[in-house]
Image (cartoon, helix red, strand yellow):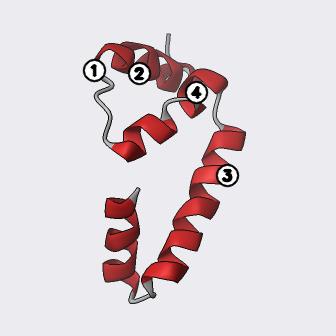
Amino acid sequence: MDELVKLVSQKTGLSEEMSKMAVEAVVGYLKEKLPAPIASQIDGVLSGADIGEDLGDLAKGLGGILGKK
């Protein structure tokens, strides 16, 4: 998540503290609104964990959101 916070800070000119608050707000919103199988992957993606084997499930979940099977 630190990488995302730095990117937001660079792109917006906000302090890192304010950027972290913004990122946390967006991540929290996504976790609430996305289906559980996808929401559960968010922390892993942000931490840089290897989600290769879970990527198929993530793609299926996104396809469902977009109306694809």
Q: Pick whichever of labels 3 and 2 is earlier in the sequence.
A: 3
Of the residues tagged 4 and 2, which is closer to the observer?
2
Of the residues tagged 1 and 3, which is closer to the observer?
1
* Residue that label 3 marks: 29
Q: Secondary structure at mark 1?
A: helix
Q: How far is the residue under mark 4 from the one under mark 2?
A: 10 Å
- Dot 2 alpha-carbon crowd within 10 angstroms: few under 14, some 14 to 19, many 20 or more: few
Q: How far is the residue under mark 1 from the one under mark 3?
A: 24 Å
Q: Pick whichever of labels 1 and 4 is earlier in the sequence.
A: 1
Q: Pick whichever of labels 1 and 2 is earlier in the sequence.
A: 1
The amino acid beneath tag 1 is Gly
**Residues tagged 1 and 2 counted as in contact (Cβ below 8 A):** no
Tell me if I can see residue 32 in this picture: yes
Q: Residue at x 41, y 56 (%)?
A: 1
The amino acid beneath tag 2 is Ala
Of the residues tagged 3 and 2, which is closer to the observer?
3
Q: Residue at x 38, y 44 (%)?
A: 47
Q: Secondary structure at mark 4?
A: helix
**Residues tagged 4 and 3 counted as in contact (Cβ below 8 A):** no
59 shown above or below 26: above
What label does residue 3 carry, if any? none
Residue 25 figure quarter: bottom right
Q: Position of residue 61 (x, y in %)?
A: 52, 20
The amino acid beneath tag 4 is Ile
* Residue that label 2 marks: 59
* Residue that label 1 marks: 52
Q: Pick whichever of labels 4 and 3 is earlier in the sequence.
A: 3
* Residue that label 4 marks: 65
Q: Pick whichever of labels 4 and 2 is earlier in the sequence.
A: 2
User: Is 32 on the left-hand or right-hand side of 59?
Assistant: right
Of the residues tagged 1 and 4, which is closer to the observer?
1
Q: Secondary structure at mark 2?
A: helix
